[in-house]
Image (cartoon, rainbow, N blue to C red):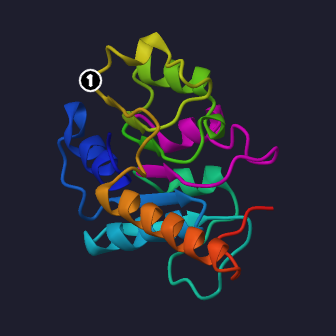
């Protein structure tokens, strides 16, 4: 039931996360539409945002890192927003978690398979990672039982996008598509 913005806020202020978000170094994995929205919101809090993506975006003012380990080394918080592909499966690996460090936080609002969940559980339970905010899981709907008892983890049932505004927008889009279809006009969002 948590929209992305609430997941980010709860992740920062629950349990061991009782720290101000302002001034934190935030690395974003995947600066697409969602990653850019997250970056803009965090910039407003005075966060120092940097990113990695398939390729550098010259129009972006945020510092670019060519790989996730380097990004993690320079981040307090790593937010995972990219698509899941064969290249990005477990992009947040043991090495990335190690680079993020004992005070680092991982927030995954992308797909569960982007993070090596077994390693994440190990790092969290052993105190080798500061915390995690997870909206997605590798084997949904199954969530590793070890995560339930940790006070440095915030779990959300893969619905961070669900807000009143997003539901209203989706409803309007469906209505406009129906109007277009029954008027023999091009659909606004055709599916092939």
Q: Residue at x 33, y 63 (%)?
A: 165
Q: Is residue 106 visible?
A: yes
Q: Quadrant of residue 131?
A: top left
Task: Tell me the quadrant of the picture where the N terminus can be found.
Answer: top left
Q: Residue at x 44, y 69 (%)?
A: 172
Q: Residue furthest front?
A: 182
Magenta includes 186? no
Residue 41 pos. (x, y %): 34, 69
How many marks on residues?
1
Task: Tell me the quadrant of the picture where the C terminus can be found.
Answer: bottom right
* Front residue of this view, candidates 124 and 54: 54
* Position above or below: 87 against 59: above
Please, what secondary structure does the residue beneath circle 1 have? Answer: loop
What span is colored magenta in the figure?
A: 77-102
Q: Is residue 188 visible?
A: no
* Front residue of this view, candidates 175 and 124: 175
Q: Residue at x 43, y 12 (%)?
A: 146
Q: Within 10 Å of the Cα at label 1, are there few (<14), some (14-19), or many (20+) other Cα atoms? A: few
Q: Residue furthest bottom?
A: 59
Magenta includes 83? yes
Q: Quadrant of residue 182?
A: bottom right
* Front residue of this view, candidates 69 and 167: 167
What residue sits right under mark 1 in the picture? Answer: 151
Residue 191 pos. (x, y %): 74, 62
Is 103 on the left or on the right of 84, as rendered?
A: left
Residue 26 pos. (x, y %): 42, 59
* Position above or below: 150 against 19: above
* Position above or below: 118 against 68: above
Is 186 on the left or on the right of 50, as rendered?
A: right
């Amino acid at each position: 039931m948590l929209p992305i913005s609430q997941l980010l806020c709860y992740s920062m202020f629950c349990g061991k996360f009782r720290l101000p978000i302002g001034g934190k170094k935030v690395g974003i994995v995947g600066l697409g539409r969602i990653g850019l929205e997250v970056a803009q919101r965090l910039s407003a809090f005075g966060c120092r945002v940097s990113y990695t993506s398939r390729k550098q975006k010259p129009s972006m003012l945020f510092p670019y890192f060519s790989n996730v380990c380097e990004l993690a080394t320079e981040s307090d918080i790593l937010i995972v927003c990219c698509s899941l592909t064969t290249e990005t499966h477990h992009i947040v690996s043991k090495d990335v978690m190690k680079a993020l460090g004992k005070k680092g936080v991982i927030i995954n609002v992308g797909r569960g398979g982007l993070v090596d969940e077994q390693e994440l559980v190990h790092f969290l339970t052993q105190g080798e990672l500061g915390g995690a905010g997870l909206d997605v899981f590798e084997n949904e709907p199954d969530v590793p039982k070890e995560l339930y008892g940790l006070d440095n983890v915030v779990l959300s049932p893969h619905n961070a996008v669900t807000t009143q505004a997003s539901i209203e927008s989706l409803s309007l889009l469906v209505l406009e598509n129906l109007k277009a279809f029954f008027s023999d006009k091009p659909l606004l969002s055709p599916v092939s």
